[in-house]
Amino acid sequence: MVRLFNTFFPRRTLMLAVSESFLVLAALYISTRSFLSHGAGAEVHQRGLVNVFIASIVFLLCMYYYDLYDSPVLDNPREVKARLVQVVGTTSIILALMYSAYPVIELSRGTFFLGIFLVGASLAGWRELFIALNRSPRLAERAMFLGDGPLAIAIAEEIAKRHELGVRLVGYLGRASVSENSPCGITRLGDFADLPRVIEDQQIDRVIVTMTDGRGRLPVELLLKLKTRGVRIQDGADVYETVTGKVPLASLRLSWLLFSPGFSVSRSMRLYKRAVSILCSLAALLLMLPLMAVVAIAIRIDSDGPAIFRQKRMGKDGKVFTLFKFRSMRSGMNGESTFKAAEKNDDRVTRVGRWLRRSRLDELPQLYNVLRGDIDFVGPRPFVPEQELDLIEKIPFYTQRLTINPGVTGWAQVNRGYCATVEENVEKLAYDLFYIKNISVALDMLILFRTVKTMILGRGGR
């Protein structure tokens, strides 16, 4: 895994993205050179390179928005082919619209069609090769667990469905009497005393320590000796966090929260977030005022009641504030004392409200909350006090998400979407704690970039 934007990405996925960037650029450049006359001047060649770069950016953005680098799609040949066709079609439409508006960036018709063909063919062939290499066990690290239990099971489930991690689980060392703890059917290789033999016989490259309680049992000296021989020794909690982008709540200990890096926001970071909130919210309010006026009129025409919905929410350190949104439900259906989480196809949502929720335009009045300092652009999503207090009682470590300002969007929103049940909010907390632990300018930028994708595709809303 490679650490970028204060989060982690599989090395193979990043290599795939970089290689496909070069493929797209090369294919479009070749098509441009094919149709440029040999006597064309340097200015024509330079303009052609700029136009190739613009077309390449559109291609790569479409590939990202069609989830071609996401795990569920990455290793599915049929899905990859279908989405590549969609990428080529969508890119062609977007470029055609851009060329009609800005002819100066246009590629010639011959260049355009040849480039589209070369890009589509090269990407399809490269993806076939990548999938074959990605699935090859010979190119994967051989790993084993030292210990069993919930954390080992959770990591094994992630590794089993994500070949791009480049890890092949060989087995685990653990208790012989507890067969139900066998992580995802991974073979038990012996007890802890068998560690040297197993490392040698199975040619293990990586040992992941997932012991529930290692005090007095963890073979520290032996692990240090293995580390000097080139075997990677990793803590299970760190591996889980790296692979999933979540904190392992099921095996979380208070001491880990206390001694692990992160979970503290510097004064400079707080000042940065406040300055950005003021400047960006003011600019966004000025730009969005005409659209907000149209939305407000549409709400009033569609149903009775005010256009703006006000609701109490719990913010930093448990402070209660009033959140502003465009009303998307029938008036009086979700007041402060009668809170009920939105459901799929909720009959309380109005016709305009359904569209507002799907496009996230109902969130626009929160720019005023950002300006006031109630919330930031990025942070944990605030809930009504009744819901927050209920979750504090039911979910351990839940109060940790109240240590920073809530946000309009956040790491949990772009990864998990809408949450209604306690189980869903447990997972959401795992994402929120990851954000609090790794909070940074770079991570905020990544979240905002992914939020744009969520808004365009209309995902997660109810």
Image (tube, rainbow, N blue to C red):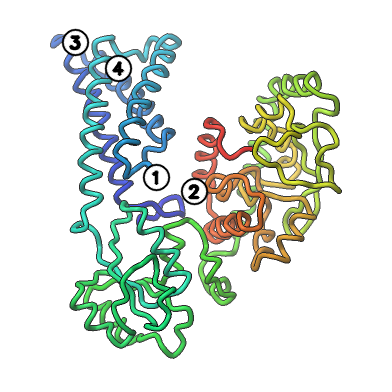
Q: Nearer the viewer, mark 2 or mark 4?
A: 2
| Residue at 28 percent of width and 20 percent of height | 116
Q: Mark 3 or 2, which is nearer the eye?
A: 2
Q: Disc 3 marks which residue?
A: 40
Of mark 4 and mark 3, the one earlier in the sequence is 3
In the depicted view, which residue is nearer to us: 321 or 68? 68
| Of the image marks 1 and 2, the number of the one nearer the N terminus | 1
Helix or strand or loop: what does disc 4 sit on? helix
Q: How far is the residue under mark 1 from the one under mark 2?
A: 25 Å
Residue 122 placed where, x, y %?
Answer: 22, 30
Q: CA distance from mark 1 to mark 4?
A: 39 Å
Callout 2: SS: helix
Is 314 placed left or right of 197 in the picture?
right
Q: Which of the pair 138/48 is nearer the observer? A: 138
Q: Earlier in the sequence, mark 3 or mark 2?
A: 3
Instruction: List the residue tagged with mark 4.
Output: 47
User: Which amino acid lies under the numbered mark 4 shown in the image of this protein?
Assistant: Arg
Dot 3 falls on a residue whose secondary structure is loop
Q: Amino acid at mark 1?
A: Pro
Q: Where residue 160 sits in the image (x, y, percent)?
A: 35, 58
Q: According to the image, label 1 marks what residue? A: 72
Q: From the image, state whether disc 1 or disc 4 is nearer to you.
A: 1
Residue at the spot of label 2: 442
| Pointer 2 or 4: first along the chain | 4
Name the element at disc 1. Answer: helix
Identify the image quadrant of residue 78.
Answer: top left
Task: Give above or below for 299 relative to 393.
Answer: above
- On the image, the x and y values in percent for residue 368 come to 74, 37
Q: Residue at x 55, y 49 (%)?
A: 411
> Which of the two labelled residues, at mark 3 and mark 1, occupies the earlier sequence position?
3
**Which amino acid type is marked by label 3?**
Ala
Q: Does residue 182 sit above or below 453 in this rendering?
A: below
